[in-house]
């Protein structure tokens, strides 16, 4: 089965990379315990071609590795 | 956008043929003739499919609620094309789905009933009670009107469930209306919502918190512990929160839609205007910039815009909860901490109406505590008899508060490690 890159739409016919962002959120209550916020516990996902993945890693590395 | 959600509330139009006193949509006259564009609608359906497949959530049920304004202002052909397109595309792409529509029924015809039945669209009936309970909405909505519309839906096999909005002109008729629906129509699910009048800083068509609980939560809970079926979904959710928290050490970590401390507006439930604009919730009376997320046609890599907006909202609510002192309130485990969209619409800022919210949840909590043993008994019996299911987060299994309530001693209780389902077996009496 051929998928498409979820960023550029190019058919994924020989290589694909799935990336996920897993967000877990908690608040510190007045009684000093961490309380999870269920609706803010989120996992999102993209399936990328090699070119878009390279672009993604390059941008993230540049912006968050300063 | 739709990967995280279980429901899309899609406003086909904000136009409406009624002018209900308490309606939170302002400037309705500005929306005359507004209808969703079919090309945009197709893009929305395609986006749902793409997002669900990408996130591998396509096997989880996704609901589209066709909403308004009044969605039946769309004509029969338009609705037919929309239902057909969505159903065909969802089936082709193996996306689990269901359809609903929220309507005042004034425009419901036999042909529309045929269509709703054909596409298995369940009808949320905006109905504020018998004995002229809907007169705050329109004087044409008398008892005969609703009986005729219910008969029509039943004739064509259309599934329906009523939504009652508690307001100053109907609140004393709510219990009788719910009883009537149970008795005469064997209604299985009814919802009674508290809705704030956002059109005035004064009380307007609102009722007080006390009036609400005395005419909704308290009588419905009393019926429940006396063995009657619970069909009002907000009261059941409240009881479930109380039962689960009493039984368990941890906070409930399940995702949710409305009426929870951190509601799922904008993330678990996506509400969209006819223009494709998505806001945190459909209950904002105007298009507040603060609540805007994105447009259905916008790209949103890794849902970053959506997630960022939602967490920003959660952070604001967290701060408000701290300021209000809710963390040390005994009722905090059942409280929804107020609707932020209504607060923004009414006062122009986020906040918690202590006078209202505390008046609903503190006395309700006291009532629940006084009746804890009876509530436990009914819940445990119903679970043991497989009449209801209750789920916990399976990650936090095996940790109960212990036998603080003697009723628990009569049952063997565990949590299914796979799905978190509470398993209850009645102990044999010696």
Image: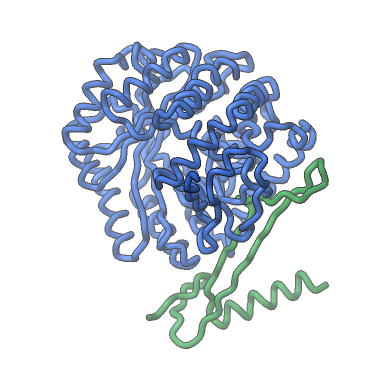
Chain colours: A green, B blue
The image quadrant of residue A50 is bottom right
Left or right of residue B396, residue B95 in this image: left
B138 or B249, which is in the foreground? B249
Residue B390, x across and y down, in percent: 50, 47
Q: Is residue A51 above or below residue B218?
A: below
The foreground one among B392 and B349 is B392
Residue at 29% across, 43% down: B121
Q: Position of residue B27 (x, y in %)?
A: 49, 25
Percent of width and height locating residue A60: 71, 72
Q: Above or below — where is B102 with respect to B54?
A: above
Q: Is residue B31 visible?
A: no
Residue at the spot x=37%, y=19% of the render?
B177
Give the vertical position of B386 relative to A24 (above or below).
Answer: above
Residue at 54% over, 39% down: B240
Residue depicted at 78% across the width and 37% down the height: B322
Q: Position of residue B279 (x, y in %)?
A: 55, 43
Left-right relation of B91 to B113:
right
Q: Residue furthest front?
A: B430
Outermost residue on the bottom side: it is A14
Residue toward you, B35 or B400: B400
Q: Is residue B112 visible?
A: yes
Which quarter of the figure has residue B287?
Answer: top right
Q: Quadrant of residue B417?
A: bottom right
For the image shown, how many numbered marks are present on the structure? Answer: 0
**Above or below, comparing residue B97 to residue B340 in the picture:** below
Q: Which residue is nearer to you in this view: B328 or B129?
A: B328
């Amino acid at each position: 089965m051929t998928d498409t890159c979820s960023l550029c739409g190019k058919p994924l016919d020989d290589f694909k990379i799935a990336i996920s962002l897993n967000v877990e959120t908690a608040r510190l209550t007045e009684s000093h315990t961490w309380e999870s916020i269920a609706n803010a516990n989120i996992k999102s996902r993209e399936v990328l071609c090699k070119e878009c993945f390279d672009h993604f890693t390059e941008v993230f590395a540049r912006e968050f590795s300063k | 956008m739709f990967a995280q959600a279980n429901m899309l509330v899609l406003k086909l139009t904000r136009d409406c043929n009624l002018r209900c006193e308490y309606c939170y949509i302002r400037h309705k006259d500005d929306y005359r003739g507004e209808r969703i564009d079919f090309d945009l609608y197709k893009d929305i359906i395609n986006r749902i499919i793409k997002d669900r497949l990408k996130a591998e959530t396509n096997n989880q049920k996704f609901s589209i609620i066709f909403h308004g304004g009044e969605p039946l202002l769309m004509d029969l052909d338009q609705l037919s094309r929309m239902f057909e397109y969505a159903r065909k595309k969802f089936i082709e792409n193996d996306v689990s789905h269901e359809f609903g529509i929220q309507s005042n029924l004034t425009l419901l015809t036999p042909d529309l009933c045929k269509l709703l039945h054909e596409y298995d669209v369940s009808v949320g009936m905006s109905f504020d009670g018998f004995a002229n309970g809907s007169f705050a909405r329109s004087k044409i909505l008398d008892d005969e009107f609703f009986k005729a519309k219910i008969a029509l839906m039943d004739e064509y096999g259309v599934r329906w469930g009523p939504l009652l909005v508690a307001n100053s002109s109907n609140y004393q008729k709510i219990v009788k209306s719910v009883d009537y629906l149970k008795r005469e129509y064997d209604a299985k699910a009814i919802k009674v919502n508290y809705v704030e009048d956002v059109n005035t800083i004064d009380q307007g068509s609102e009722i007080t918190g006390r009036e609400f609980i005395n005419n909704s939560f308290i009588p419905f809970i009393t019926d429940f512990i006396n063995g009657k079926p619970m069909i009002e979904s907000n009261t059941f959710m409240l009881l479930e929160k109380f039962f689960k928290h009493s039984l368990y050490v941890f906070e409930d970590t399940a995702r949710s839609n409305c009426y929870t401390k951190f509601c799922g507006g904008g993330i678990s439930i996506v509400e969209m205007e006819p223009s494709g604009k998505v806001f945190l919730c459909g209950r904002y009376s105007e298009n507040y910039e603060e609540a805007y997320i994105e447009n259905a046609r916008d790209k949103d890599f890794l849902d970053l815009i959506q997630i960022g907006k939602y967490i920003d909202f959660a952070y604001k609510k967290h701060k408000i909860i701290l300021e209000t002192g809710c963390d040390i309130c005994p009722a905090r485990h059942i409280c929804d901490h107020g609707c932020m969209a209504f607060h923004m619409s009414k006062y122009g800022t986020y906040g918690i109406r202590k006078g209202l919210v505390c008046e609903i949840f503190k006395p309700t909590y006291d009532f629940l505590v006084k009746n804890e043993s009876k509530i436990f008994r009914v819940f445990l019996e119903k679970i043991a008899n497989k009449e209801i299911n209750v789920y916990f987060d399976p990650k936090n299994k095996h940790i109960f508060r212990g036998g603080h309530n003697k009723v628990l001693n009569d049952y063997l209780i565990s949590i299914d490690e796979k799905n978190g389902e509470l398993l209850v077996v009645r102990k044999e009496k010696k």
